[in-house]
Image (cartoon, rainbow, N blue to C red):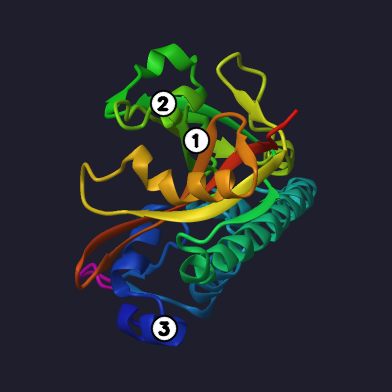
Amino acid sequence: MKYKIGEVSRILNIPIDTIRYLEKKNIVNPSKDSNNYRFYEAWDINFLTEYKKFRSFDFSVPEVEEILHSDNLENFIGRISKRQKYFEDKLKYYTFLKQKNQKYLDSLNNIKKNLWKCSFTECPSIYYFIHRFNYKYAGKEKFDGLFETWLNYFPFIDTIVEMQLDAVMNRDTNNNYEWGFSIKKKYADAFNIPLNSDKVNHVKSTQSVYTVICAGEKGSFSLKLLNKALEFIEDNGCELAGNVIGNLLARVHEPNGYFRYIEVWLPVKKIDKF
């Protein structure tokens, strides 16, 4: 029995335009009558069914065309074997992504609880590099491809702000800060993200004060947003012991304006009174 293209479209739930496209890509080759109308037999529909099957394996259209019209049994087995490695890599990716997203979700759910509140904790161990100084980006050529490489690994890359110790201590007259990208070592190891550049810095886990700060509209970010945390440090007999590291959690729009929530870690040490 022969079927018109519209009937095939309804049978397989494939748009007519897609069926025509697949003909151009040599997936299916229907017969045509004297008026150039296409007719599809069960044989042709089999190829379209197989197309849907192998596309569900994430094979590209050219790969499906090779499977359907070129592969012998050995090549076909080899192709499916390689697909197994592809799925294993995908599983690893999404396993890590699920973990990363859960931690991110936990941080987002705790924003209101931690906003302007301070507590002692260990800062996470991270690797990072700086690409923006205040409002000026460094030229990408200075990073030997590092910038572009790390961009490819979102969402495992976070947006980091670094506030130098000297600038923080002189925040009434100095509002310099730096932005960049950061990543935890386990993600870098899992996906072979380069950490060996001399542009990549390492923050070791150390005793810190943790808080969440909030900046508003453009130009509102200020080192003075750390005032409450610095008061907390002083009140607890400690002092700032290094550069402050922050992680941008969210940019959101509320009825009363634009908000940027940033979690920060301020490294501390006890003041020696003697």
Q: Amino acid at mark 1?
A: Phe
Q: How far apart are the two marked residues, 3 and 2, measured between alpha carbons? A: 78 Å
x then y, percent, for residue 219: 21, 41
Q: Is residue 115 magenta?
A: no
Q: Amino acid at mark 2?
A: Ala
Q: How far apart are the two marked residues, 3 and 1, measured between alpha carbons? A: 59 Å
Q: Earlier in the sequence, mark 3 or mark 2?
A: 3
Magenta residues span 33-37
Q: How far apart are the two marked residues, 2 and 1, measured between alpha carbons? A: 20 Å
Tag shown at residue 2: 3
Please identify, in this view, whether the residue under mark 3 or under mark 2 is nearer the observer. 2
x then y, percent, for residue 130: 47, 26
Check disc 3: other Cα within 10 Å, few if <14, some if 14-19, many if 20+.
Answer: some
Dot 2 falls on a residue whose secondary structure is: helix
Please identify, in this view, whether the residue under mark 2 or under mark 1 is nearer the observer. 2
Do we see residue 135 in this rendering?
yes
